[in-house]
Image (cartoon, coloured by chain):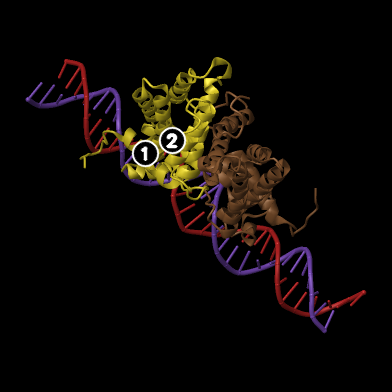
Chain colours: A brown, B yellow, C purple, D red
Amino acid sequence: MVKRGYHHGNLRQALVDAALDLIREKGPTGFTLSEAAKQAGVTPAAVYRHFEGREDLIAEAARQGYEIFADLMQYAYDKGQPSALAAFEATGRAYLAFARKHPGHYIAMFESGISVNRTPELAAVAKRAWDVLEKAASDLSQHIPPEKRPPASMFSAHIWAMSHGVVELFARNSPGTQSPFPPEDLLESGIGVYLRGLGLIPPDS
Amino acid sequence: MVKRGYHHGNLRQALVDAALDLIREKGPTGFTLSEAAKQAGVTPAAVYRHFEGREDLIAEAARQGYEIFADLMQYAYDKGQPSALAAFEATGRAYLAFARKHPGHYIAMFESGISVNRTPELAAVAKRAWDVLEKAASDLSQHIPPEKRPPASMFSAHIWAMSHGVVELFARNSPGTQSPFPPEDLLESGIGVYLRGLGLIPPDS
DNA sequence: TGTACATCAGTGAACGCGCGTTCACTGATGTAC
DNA sequence: TGTACATCAGTGAACGCGCGTTCACTGATGTAC
C-alpha cells in the first residue's frame, strides 16, 4: 500500500481504474461517479479536477481500452508473420482474449453507449485497432484470385461481427445463457468454416 | 384517440408500449418507470397495479419481443420450405429484419441486462426462437456427410453470433460508426461465405 | 329496472436516497530570491 | 539554507433533482337481488 497524504499522487489513473472495476461489476448502468471517487479514497468533487464529468471518465476508460486492444491486435498480427493465415487467426483469437482479460475495458468500449466519435483521440485509436484486422484480412486475401476476392473491409467486418457476437452472446452471462461450447472453440471453428468458404484453407481438415 | 375516464382500459399494454418507446429512444439506461407512467398518462404509482416494478416492466417488454421474434423466425422458416437452404437463409434475414423493425424490443431483449432466465416464461419463449434457428441449421446440415457435419447447435450458434454482431456493430449507431456496407448485404454475404465453407452451396457463385 | 355493495384501478402526497455538480475553502507542494 | 508566496489538488457542505416505492384514499365498474 502506497502512503499518501493530502495529495493523491496519481488520482486520475486511480479514478479510471476504479471506474473499470465498477463497470465490470455492475455494468455501465450501475457505474456512478460518486462511487468511483469513494473507491479511489476521494471526495466526488475531486473528480472534477481531472475530468469534465461522468461521461468523460467513461470515455477515458474506453480510450485506454482501445489502446490496449490495438496493441494486442498489432502484437498478434506481428507474431503471426510471415504467414498471412497465422497472422489473421492470431488477431481473431486476440479479440476474444482481450474481451476475457479486460472485461471492464470491453464494456466501456462496446456496451457503455459512448460513441467512438466522441473525441478525435478516441476515434483515432479505435481506427488503429480496426486497421490491424483489416490489414490482416487484406494480406490474407492476396491468396484469393482478384476476381473472386471480397473487399478486405467486408472480409474483416464479417470476422469482427462474428467475434463480437460470440463475445456478447456466449462469453458473457447475458442472454445466451451459457454457451453449448467454449467461446474460444466456437469462434475458432466459425472462423475456420468462414475461411474455408473463401477457399483460404483446404475444404477438408 | 380513445376516450377514457378514470380507468384506463388497457394500462398494462400501454405501459409496455411506452417502455418500448423510451428504451428505443434513450437506451435501457435512460428508461425510467416514472417517465413510462407519464407517457401512458398515469401516475407512477399506477404502474404497481400491473407490474412488480421497473425490472418487471422491462422483462415483460423483452418477453413480448421474444414472442414476436420467435413468430417471425417460425414464419420465415415455414416460408422457405421445402428448401432447407431457403428456409435457413430466410431465418437469417428475419433476425436482422426483426432488429430493424422492433428496435425497442431488440434492446430490451439483448442490451437491457435482463437475464433470459429471469422467469420460466422468458426462458421458454427465448428457447422457442432459438430452436427455430437450430432446426433450420439441422435440416440444412443433412446435406453434409455425417462425418463432416458439425453439430447443429454449433452451426446455429455461429450464425446467431454473426447476425448479432452485424446488428450491434453496424446496424445501430454505436461503436462501428457507420458500416462500410449495408448491414443486410454484410450479413447475407457473410452467411454465404460461411455456407460455402460447409460445402452447402457451390464454391463459386 | 333500480339499488346496495364489493371490487377494482386509479390518485396524490410523501418518503428517503443517491446522484452529479458547484463553490468557497484550505492544506500541500514547488519555486524565486 | 531559509523564507514568502503562487499554484495546485484536495475538502466538505450544500444544491436541486428525479428516481423508485409506499400508503391511505377515492372514483368507477360490475354484480346480486
Quadrant in the rendering for residue A47: bottom right
x and y, in percent, of residue D19 in the image: 45, 44
The numbered disc on residue B101 is: 1
Give whichever of discs 2 and 1 has the lower sequence position: 2
Per the model, the C-alpha gap separating discs 2 and 1 is 18 Å
Q: Which chain is indicated by disc 2? A: B
**Mark 2 or 1, closer to the camera:** 1
Q: Nearer the viewer, residue B71 or A203?
A: A203
> Which amino acid, by three-letter code, is at mark 2?
Ile
| Residue receiving disc 2 | B58
Are there few (<14), some (14-19), or many (20+) residues within 10 Å of tag 2?
Answer: many
Residue B14, relative to residue B156: is it above or below?
Answer: below
Q: Which chain is indicated by disc 1? A: B
Residue B149 appearing in the image: yes
> Which amino acid, by three-letter code, is at mark 1?
Lys
Circle 2: element type: helix
Q: Nearer the viewer, residue A86 or D6?
A: A86
Left or right placement of residue B200 versus residue A20 in this view: left
Are there few (<14), some (14-19), or many (20+) residues within 10 Å of tag 1?
Answer: few
Quadrant in the rendering for residue B49: top left
Q: Residue at x 80, y 53 (%)?
A: A3
Q: Nearer the viewer, residue B182 or A83?
A: A83
x and y, in percent, of residue A176 in the image: 53, 29
